[in-house]
Amino acid sequence: MFTKGIRGAITVEENSPEAIGSATIKLLQEIVKVNNVDINMISHAIFTLTPDLNADFPAKYARINLKWSDVPMMCFNELDVPNSLRMCLRVLIVINCSENFIPEFVYLEGAECLRK
């Protein structure tokens, strides 16, 4: 068994619990779909948010809406780098998988500019 990470990011429309929740669910559902991830494969998930997003914890929406109640998750502030993308939620999902698994990273909305 191998451990690999799947990265993803999405921009959030506003600093509100509803917008953070909606963006979190959209991003995680797309990552799971594109990579064919079963919840039992997930070791843990790390979320970061730019400093302008502090209205809620993304992990809450994974736990409640996607039933990731047994997945260890943490939320952190992203570094406040000048001229970097604002209103951005990022995630690193660490999974247990086969050696030949090739993760496909997912960048949505305004975050698509991060990986052209």
Image (cartoon, grey):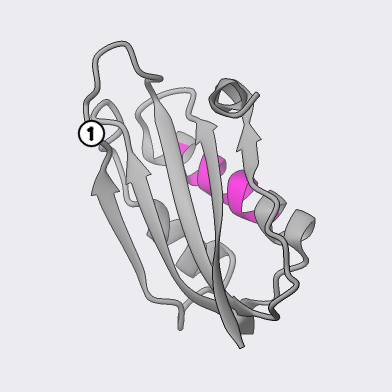
| Percent coordinates x, y for residue 11 in the rendering | 50, 28
Q: Does 7 appear above or below 10?
A: below
| Percent coordinates x, y for residue 56 in the rendering | 31, 46
> Label 1 neighbourhood size at 10 Å, few (<14), some (14-19), many (20+)?
few
Q: Nearer the viewer, residue 105 or 48?
A: 105
Q: Residue lying furthest bottom in this view?
A: 1
Q: Residue lying furthest front in this view?
A: 99
Amino acid under disc 1: Leu
Q: Does 85 appear above or below 88?
A: above
Quarter placement of the N terminus: bottom right
Q: Which residue does the image show at 30% across and 32% down from the upper left? A: 50
| Percent coordinates x, y for residue 37 in the rendering | 70, 70
Tell me which secondary structure the magenta stretch mostly adopts: helix
Q: Nearer the viewer, residue 99 or 78?
A: 99
Q: Which residue does the image show at 34% across and 45% down from the upper left? A: 48
| Percent coordinates x, y for residue 51 in the rendering | 23, 30
Q: Which residue does the image show at 63% across and 77% down from the upper left? A: 39
Q: In the figure, residue 110 lies in which quadrant?
A: top right
Q: Does 13 appear above or below 79?
A: above
- In the picture, measured across the screen, residue 8 lies left or right of residue 82, that is right
* Magenta span of residues: 20-29
- In the picture, measured across the screen, residue 25 lies left or right of residue 60, that is right
Residue under circle 1? 79
In the image, is residue 113 part of the stretch drawn in magenta? no
Q: Does 4 appear above or below 19?
A: below
Looking at the image, how many numbered discs can be counted on the residues? 1
Secondary structure of residue under mark 1: loop
Quarter placement of the C terminus: top right
